[in-house]
Each structure stands twice: as C-alpha cells, then as structure tokens.
Image (cartoon, helix red, strand yellow):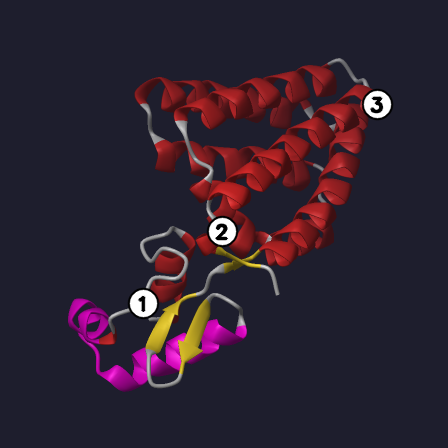
Amino acid sequence: MESSLRAAIVTLDFAPGEFIDKAAVCDRLGVSRFPVSEALSRLATEGLAEILPQRGTRAARIRLHEVKEAMLIRRALEAMVAEIAAQRLPPSILTALHENLAAQQEAVARGDRAGFHLLDLSFHTLLVDGLELPRVANVIEASRANIDRVRRLLSSPRRHAVTLFEHQKLLEAIESRNPRAARRAMESHLDGVMEELERFSAANPEVFRKD
C-alpha cells in the first residue's frame, strides 16, 4: 500500500501539487479509506505528500533547497567514488558498466524514458557496489526520492543523450586509471543536472516549494 503510493508519487503518476483522489486509490487497490489515509500520513512525514485540512491530500511540491542539499551530498560522495573507481574498480564491474552503456544507447535510440532512467540508476549503483562501499550506498540511497522526482521531470531525449555521453566519458576516465579525470567527469555530470534543474525550476515555479 504505502510502497505503491510512494512509487506513484516518485514516478510522477501524481504530479507535484496534484491532489490525490483517495476514493480512486481505494478502488484501484481494493482497500478501505483508513489504510490509504494512514499511508499518506506516513508519506507526509517523508515530505512526499502534503495534507491540507478541509482540502485533501496532494503529492508534495518539491522542496528545491532539499534537492540542492541532496545533490551536494551526492556530488561529494560520487566524485569520491569515481576517483577510487579509477584506482581499483574490478574488471568484472568495468564489463558490467560497458553492458549497461550499450543498453543505455539502445534505450536512447528507441526513446525509452523509463528504461533509461533505470539504467542510469544502475550505472551509478554498479560503481558504488563494485567498490564494496555499503555505507556510502546507503547515504546516497537515503537522498534519492526527491532527486528521482527531479530527474524524471528533467527527462527528455536530449537529456538522455547528454547523460549517455557523460557516462561514456566517465567510464573512459575510469578505464584509463585516471582518478583526477574520473572525479572531474563525475562532478561535471552532476553539475549539469543541477544547472538544468535551475532552468527548469525558474520556468516551472509551481512544481517547487522554496521554504
């Protein structure tokens, strides 16, 4: 129940600011209103839902400052991961990354947005898991919900093509065992996402909260 509602919000089935029809959710999931209300209350504590007295519950607008903070944490950690990967990432993980990039290229060619998003996440996960850094992985994962919503909002054929190119340059730096270049490639990749977010938030202020 809760996981289904969380996924619907994160994947933008409920757009930021969109009111959630509890009756429709109950019909779709075959449950009563009480568990739906309870699940939405818990999601409100996570910042994914907003309960408005006398008005209803809606998918929370995205708190821009929280996304920026989460991206700052992610940039610091993943730049470090890229640097270490260039020093000691195992050959088996390099092979898996090449396979992932080949699948990314196919997803870009067929315009598969959902598929590309999953491959993008997997690419970054392979780097962390390949270095056996579970605590780092947990910190990155903890900041992912609002970041995932933003990445889906920014999703476009152009953004996917750019991301694919940036991933390719990052893997080249890692394979060449150049830690400094790998760090720069990861920082540039994540900085590009933030720059696009700034443009998107300026053009679509109704999606975001600045408090």
Kind of residue at disc 1: Phe
- Give the residue drawn at x 41%, y 57%: 16
Above or below — where is 57 with respect to 194?
below
Could you give the CA–CA distance between mark 1 and mark 2, rounded to whole angstroms?
17 Å
| Residues in magenta, as a range | 23-45
Q: Main secondary structure of the magenta part?
A: helix
* Mark 3 or 1, closer to the camera: 1
Q: Which residue is mark 1?
A: 19
125 sits left or right of 180 in the view? left
Secondary structure state at the residue bearing disc 1: loop
Q: Which residue is mark 2?
A: 205
Q: Residue 165, how many percent across, how many down?
A: 56, 18
Total marks placed? 3
Could you give the CA–CA distance between mark 3 and mark 2, rounded to whole angstroms?
37 Å
Q: Which residue is mark 3?
A: 180
Q: Residue 123, how many percent across, how many down?
A: 56, 32
